Image (spheres, rainbow, N blue to C red):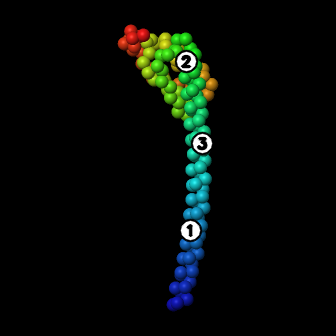
Amino acid sequence: MLAGIVLTLGTAGIGFAQSASQSMHNAGEDTENAAVNVYHGTKTAVKDTDVTTKVKLALHDDALTKDKGIHVKTVAGIVTLRGRVASNAISERAEKVARDTTGVKGVRNDLRVSTVHASAQ
C-alpha cells in the first residue's frame, strides 16, 4: 500500500513539474507578445503624431484653410478633421489637403459648416 501511495505521489509530482514548466513557458510567450504589442503600439503612436503634425502644417500653409481652427487627430493613419468652418469650400479643401499629406491612410471629415462662424470672421 505504501508503494502505491509513493507511486501515486511520484506520478503527480512529475505531472506538476510538467505543468509548472508549461506555465512558465506560456508566461514567457505572453511576456514576449506583450512586449511586441507595446513596441508596435508605440511605433504607431509615433507615426500618428508625425502625420498629425504634417497635416496641421499643410493646413496652416494653405491659404484657404490657414487659421480656421481645424482640429486634427490621427489614429492608425486615419486623420479626423473637426471644428467649425465658414463654408463647404473650406471643408472640402481641408479634406483634400489632409488626404494629400504623406502618411495619411484615410480622412474622416467631421468639419461643420457654420454661418455663425462665417459672420464672426
Between label 2 and label 3, give the one nearer the viewer. Answer: 2
Q: Which one is earlier in the sequence, the residue at label 2 or at label 1?
A: 1
Residue 98 x %, y %:
56, 21
Above/below status of 60 relative to 18: above
Regarding residue 105, the answer to whether it shows in the image is no
Circle 1 SS class: helix
Residue 65 x %, y %:
52, 15
Three-letter amino acid code of the residue under disc 1: Ser
What residue is shown at x 56% (from left), y 14% (from top)?
62
Three-letter amino acid code of the residue under disc 3: His
Circle 2 SS class: helix
In this view, the residue in front, 64 or 29, is 64
Local crowd at mark 1 within 10 Å, few (<14), some, or many (≥20)?
few
Q: What residue is shown with label 2?
A: 60
Between label 3 and label 1, give the one nearer the viewer. Answer: 3
Q: What residue is shown with label 3?
A: 40
Q: Which one is earlier in the sequence, the residue at label 3 or at label 1?
A: 1
Above/below status of 92 relative to 45: above
In this view, the residue in front, 120 or 35, is 120
Residue 95 x %, y %:
52, 19
Mark 2 in CB contact with mark 3 (< 8 angstroms) = no
Mark 2 in CB contact with mark 1 (< 8 angstroms) = no
Circle 3 SS class: helix
Q: Tell which residue pokes out farthest to the right in this image.
A: 102
What residue is shown at x 52% (from left), y 15% (from top)?
66
Three-letter amino acid code of the residue under disc 2: His
The alpha-carbon separation of the residues under discs 2 and 3 comes to 30 Å
What residue is shown at x 55% (from left), y 18% (from top)?
60
Between label 2 and label 1, give the one nearer the viewer. Answer: 2
Q: What residue is shown with label 1?
A: 19
